[in-house]
Image (cartoon, rainbow, N blue to C red):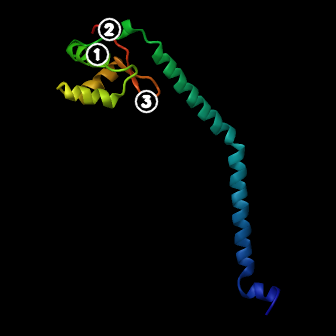
Amino acid sequence: MTGMEAISAHNGWAISAIGVTIVFTGLTVLSLTISQLHKVLAFMERKKSDSQKRAEGAKEIDVSDIIIPGDMKETAREYKMIIDRMDAPFSLPRLLELSEKCGLNRPYSNLNDLIGSGLIEPDGEGYYRWKGPDNP
């Protein structure tokens, strides 16, 4: 058996129809993806520009705008003394290590509070800077 008889006997027509359907579906999905790609790129660009605006806005904060709660003044003073001995910008893990060596109370929680209040801020390159007043 050869030719068209072999194709019919071994379900060749069904297999070729399924193959054509798969290829057509794939090309349709590809064309739809390419036609909508400009929307995805615009969304990603907008998201990137929003994060840059937030970063620029964070840099414009004046030190006088930062208010240290009364219960954090002593903590801020202790951490400021440690930070003064480190290179600027400083590494947060190194600051945690030094605060534990100095025997400061609850170093993880206190650093979280200092970052949350804006006294310590990230510089965008994996390091941190003291943003608070020089004498808390």
Q: Tell me how far mark 1 sits from mark 2, CA to CA.
A: 8 Å
What amino acid type should be assigned to the residue bearing mark 3?
Gly
User: At x 60% / y 34%, what residue is drawn?
Assistant: 43
Position of 43 with respect to 116 (left or right) is right
Q: Residue 23: give its label.
A: none
Secondary structure of residue under mark 1? helix
Q: Nearer the viewer, residue 32 or 83?
A: 83
How crowded pointer 2 is (Cα within 10 Å; few <14, some 14-19, many 20+) is rated as few
Where's residue 107, x and y in %? 23, 27
Q: Is residue 52 above or below residue 63?
A: below
* The image quarter in which residue 132 lies: top left
In this view of the protein, can residue 133 be seen by the observer?
A: yes
* The image quarter in which residue 86 lies: top left
Nearer-N-terminus badge (1/3):
1
Q: Residue 80: give its label.
A: 1
Where's residue 47, x and y in %? 56, 30
Q: Which residue is mark 2?
A: 134
Q: Hey, which residue is sitting farthest bottom in the picture?
A: 1
Verify CB contact (< 8 Å) between mark 1 and mark 2.
Answer: yes
Q: Quadrant of the N terminus?
A: bottom right
User: At x 36% / y 27%, what residue is drawn?
Assistant: 91
Q: Quadrant of the C terminus?
A: top left
Secondary structure of residue under mark 2? loop
Q: Which residue is mark 3?
A: 126
